Amino acid sequence: MINAAIVGCNGKMGYFVAQSLSESKNAQTLFGVDAYGESKLEFPVYKSFDEAEQKPDVIIDFSNPAALDGMLSYAVENSVPCVICTTGYSTEQIEQIKEASKKIAVFYSGNMSLGINLLIALSKQAAKVLGGSFDIEIVEKHHNLKVDAPSGTALMIADAISDTLENEPQYVYDRHAYRKKRSENEIGIHSVRGGTIVGEHEVIFAGHDEVVTLTHQAQSKEVFAAGAVNAAVFLASQKPGMYDMTAMLSSVL
């Protein structure tokens, strides 16, 4: 049985992770870490790792980029693997994560859904076939409380497609600032925020007189929590390094 610490346990995703862990046969919650401190959850909750009295087997992080420093410092010092699901990190913070992975196992993904990772794989395949002659646009939709834009998943999709294309494309996030014809070497990325949309991602390949569209819709946040718990069980036995959903799926296929 894997003992997990949940960073951001008082948040919406933290709640779903705790629920998923309570239903798991392979993992359970040891304690939570949240800047808001205690809650009504059925396990100890600390404001920081400095207060923690137990050592977990793995950390699951669904919090805020501001929590990264304290979490990585604790994880490296105590050799605890980290499943990092938070998005919105700066370039410098991503480098911190990569540096930490030299000493501990780190599972880093902008989306823990199995379906979205299939979408990414299909988008890469489509780019190999269509990328040279089709324009590529990515549209992501999320609830009105989401802070970062574009979503980490949209960037994951764009990066995967970019790795497939012969020429590195330019990411264009907004077109209102200039008026000119769309260049061939670009990927448009667009964000929509509204209501309670859990998460929708659409990849559009637009060619001459035909359009191919790949779409994924998350109906609840539970799919991300279940993926994070599966990643935690997988990561607990891994050597230091960077891991993602592809690595986890490869281990069981």
Image: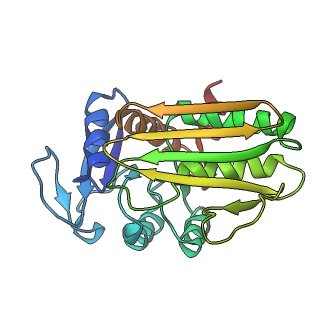
Most foreground residue, 78 or 229: 229
Q: Is residue 32 left or right of residue 124?
A: left
Residue drawn where x is 53% and y is 71% of the image: 90
Residue drawn where x is 42% and y is 67% of the image: 65
143, above or below 71, in the image: above
Residue drawn where x is 70% and y is 61% of the image: 171
Assign the C terminus to one quadrant of the image.
top right
x then y, percent, for residue 211: 73, 32
Picture quadrant of residue 179: bottom right
Most foreground residue, 15 or 81: 15
187, above or below 70, in the image: above
- The type of colouring in the image is rainbow
Residue drawn where x is 39% and y is 61% of the image: 147
Most foreground residue, 187 or 68: 187
x then y, percent, for residue 230: 46, 35
Assign the N terminus to one quadrant of the image.
top left
89, above or below 210, in the image: below
x then y, percent, for residue 181: 78, 60
Residue lying furthest top:
253
Q: How many marks overall?
A: 0
Q: In this view, does 143 lie to the left or right of 109?
A: left
Q: Is residue 206 left or right of residue 176?
A: right
Most foreground residue, 239 or 154: 154
